[in-house]
């Protein structure tokens, strides 16, 4: 298993940040590796919401099916995504920052199966770069809200 964590701090008002990032479809706006993210159900945002996420990493597109497994508004959003040879658990933790802004902690756990397990050392380097790119994109998007 590979675990990666990044933090982003912004002066953008806390409520605006948490509302924006709680909507997983916005990932396509701030994560440069997300080509498309769509919600597959309707209704209020709550645990059980499902998403289809298409990512492009190292020139290759892949699709993950996500489920929102823990949603605590203004506290935490946790999703579990599954695709070919991969289970990803992604968590966003929201904390207040000085001056009314927000600190966002992004934590991802990648559990590979099959032949992908053999490539974990190389995948860790790649996923670290992907997380860096995502944190930079998140920072830009949040600062512009």
Image (cartoon, grey):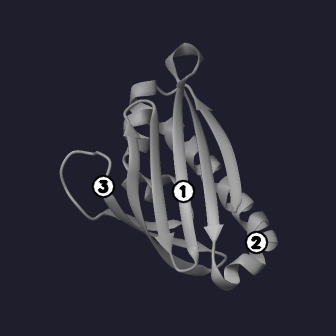
Tell me the residue that label 3 is attached to: 49
Question: Is tag 1's residue or tag 3's residue first in the polypeptide sequence?
Answer: 3
Viewer-side residue, 8 vs 114? 114
The dot on residue 89 is 1
The quadrant of the picture occupied by the C terminus is top left
Tell me the residue that label 2 is attached to: 120
Mark 1 and mark 2 in contact (Cβ < 8 Å)? no
Outermost right residue? 121
Q: State the separation of the CA atoms marked 1 and 3.
A: 15 Å
> How many residues crowd mark 1 within 10 Å: few (<14), some (14–19), many (20+)?
many
The quadrant of the picture occupied by the N terminus is bottom right
Quadrant of the rendered image containing residue 42: bottom left
Q: Residue 93 appears at what percent x and percent y? A: 53, 36
- The residue at the point 63 percent across, 66 percent down is 111
Query: Eyeballing the image, is 2 above or below 99?
Result: below
Viewer-side residue, 117 vs 100? 117
Query: Eyeballing the image, is 139 above or below 80?
Result: above
């Amino acid at each position: 298993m590979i675990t990666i964590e990044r933090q982003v701090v912004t002066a953008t008002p806390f409520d605006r940040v948490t509302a924006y990032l709680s909507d997983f479809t916005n990932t396509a706006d701030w994560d440069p590796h997300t080509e498309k993210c769509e919600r597959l159900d309707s209704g209020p945002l709550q645990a059980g919401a499902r998403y289809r996420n298409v990512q492009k990493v190292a020139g290759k597109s892949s699709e993950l099916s996500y489920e929102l497994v823990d949603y605590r508004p203004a506290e935490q959003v946790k999703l579990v995504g599954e695709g070919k040879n991969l289970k990803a658990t992604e968590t966003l933790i929201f904390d207040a920052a000085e001056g009314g802004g927000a600190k966002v902690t992004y934590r991802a756990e990648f559990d590979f199966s099959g032949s992908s397990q053999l490539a974990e050392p190389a995948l860790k380097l790649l996923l670290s770069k992907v997380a860096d790119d995502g944190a930079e994109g998140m920072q830009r998007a949040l600062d512009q809200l």
